[in-house]
Structures are given as structure tokens and as C-alpha cells.
Image (cartoon, helix red, strand yellow):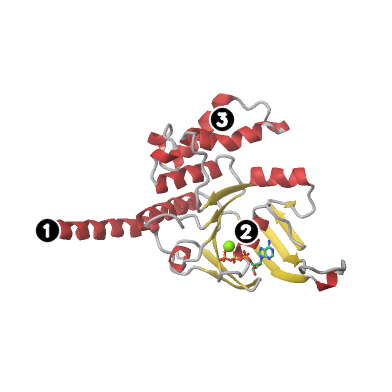
Amino acid sequence: MSVIEMKGIKREYRMETRGKKSKDSEQDVIVRALRGVDFSADAGEFVSVMGPSGSGKSTLMNILGCLDKPTAGTYTLDGIETSASNPDTFAYIRNRKIGFVFQSFNLLARTTALENVELPLFYRRREKDDVKQHNSTRKEQAISALKEVGLAGRMDHFPSQLSGGQQQRVAIARAMVNDPAFILADEPTGNLDTGMTLEIMGLFQQLNNQGKTIIMVTHEPELAAYTKRIITLRDGELVSDKLVKKRRNAVDDLAKWNKDHALLSGAFAG
Ligand SMILES: Nc1ncnc2c1ncn2[C@@H]1O[C@H](COP(=O)(O)OP(=O)(O)OP(=O)(O)O)[C@@H](O)[C@H]1O
Ligand SMILES: [Mg+2]
């Protein structure tokens, strides 16, 4: 079943011409950021979104993440037509159906790893169907999400007491704790070194093997090689949609990288 179904998605920005006297909107410049994109993804997919700067990746991500609505076209998420929804429903879909992972982690600084992961569940409690959710269940859910990302031993640490890779793991646990329809990751390893990048890609592959659907924006072909499918945007159009033929395994690559690294530091140590 399709988790994501986009048809004819257009996003146009109207730029008002400066200093004009009349209210003649025909003089406005229209930027066509997306020019009719068709894209669908099934449960269990792992898709990279690629394309040069200005091609419309962020615009597409914002629409996929229900942060923005298209100017034209339809976007159905998990069977719900999002473009027609009212603001409350739109926010509900965003909070419950999508798990966000950002380049900059976006964790709350004065809050432990566990509390950061619990946060989406607090918002959820305000909704009618979840009034009965207890504090203990919430904590259990957050603990189990942190265990899934391999951070069982770091739950009481604050973000500043964690490595970049560990902080991103917390963010991934937070993205998963609501059991969203898919995870939307925007350059998730952009702030990480090679080792940590491979760790995070390994974690994404592991979660995807367990059935999680992941959509990831990346500039780097090396990272797209860990996903299962690559879509490419150019000038607001989807110009290519390909399955990854020889998918790389991030755990294997990390082991190799660690080995090379150890040899290298050994050589320097004499
Ligand atoms: N708020 C806005 N108002 C006007 N034009 C915009 C706005 N946001 C984006 N655009 C334009 O839409 C086009 C697509 O922008 P977008 O940010 O989606 O590109 P991108 O692929 O994410 O690029 P990058 O790789 O540099 O992040 C660009 O030409 C951009 O200038
Ligand atoms: Mg962008």
C-alpha cells in the first residue's frame, strides 16, 4: 500500500515586484519551485531525494512533511488527503504520521535524552484518543525507542554530554517514538564525520530492514548508495527515479573504515 502518493504537485512562489505603485499582480514574478511532481512510495521503502541546489528538494520535503501545502496537485499520506485538510487536521497529520530528523539534531539542550524522546508523546496526550495514556507507558515507549537506536546506557545524558552521532540517534529515537508512517530525514549526517555518518546510515538500514519507511534528502551519491531508491529533481521536475542496484551495507563499510583507521593510527604511532 502506498504510504505517500503525490500527483501533479506544484509549488509556486509569487514574488511581489518592489516599489510598484499599482496593485497589479500581473507584474509579480512567479517562481515555479515544483512544476508537477508525481511521486509515490510504499511502506518499507528507503528513498533518497537528490538534485542540484535550487532544484526543489526542500520545497518537496516541506510538502512531504506537511509543513507547507502545494499550490496545485494532491498529496495523500497513509490514505489521508492532506491538501484538503483543515489546519488542525494538517497539524495532527504532521505530529502523528511523520518523524523528522534534521541535520542539526534539534534536541532540547536542558533536557535529557529520555525526556527529548518522550516529548512527542506529551503532545499526543492532548489529543482525544490518547487521554488515557499514562506517564509510565510514555516512559516505557521512550526507553524502548532509545534501546532500538543503541542508547540504553545514555538515557540520562544531556545533549552536550553526547557525541554528534549519539545526539542524532536520540533524534532518530524521537522521530520513531510515535510510530509514524514514515521518517523524513533532511541531510541527517551533514554535521557528522565519516565514522558517525556510517553509524547513522547503518542504523537507518537496520530500521528499514525492520520495516520502517524512510525518505532522506542528501547531496551525496555515496550516501544515496545505502538507500534502495533514488529520485532526482531538476528545475522543479522529477527527472529520474531509479532503484539502487548494488546497495552498500553501512555496517560493513564502517568495519572496514575502522580497520583502515586503526592501521593508519598504528602507522603514526610507529
Ligand atoms: N519562500 C520562497 N520564496 C520564493 N522562492 C523560493 C522560496 N523558497 C524557495 N524558493 C525558490 O524555489 C526554488 C527551489 O528551492 P529549494 O529550496 O526547494 O531548493 P533545494 O533543492 O532545496 O536547494 P538546496 O540544495 O540549495 O537546499 C529555488 O529557485 C528557490 O529560489
Ligand atoms: Mg534545500
Q: Position of residue 258 (x, y in %)?
A: 28, 56
Disc 2 C-beta below 8 A from ligand 2: yes
Residue pictured at 15% horizontal, 56% vertical: 269
What is the CA distance from the residue labelled 3 to the residue labelled 1? 52 Å
Identify the residue under disc 3.
138
What is the CA distance from the residue labelled 2 to the residue labelled 1? 49 Å
Nearest to the observer: residue 248 or residue 218? 218
Q: Is residue 237 visible?
A: yes
Tag 2 and tag 3, C-beta contact below 8 Å:
no
Q: Position of residue 97 (x, y in %)?
A: 64, 46
The amino acid type found where label 2 is placed reads: Met
The amino acid type found where label 3 is placed reads: Arg
Nearest to the observer: residue 191 or residue 7? 191
Q: Quadrant of the N terminus?
A: bottom right
Q: Is residue 1 visible?
A: no
Q: Position of residue 15 (x, y in %)?
A: 74, 67
Nearer to us: label 2 or label 1? 1
* Secondary structure state at the residue bearing disc 2: helix
Compare marks 3 and 1 and give the one earlier in the sequence: 3
Relative placement, left or right, of 247 versus 63 is left
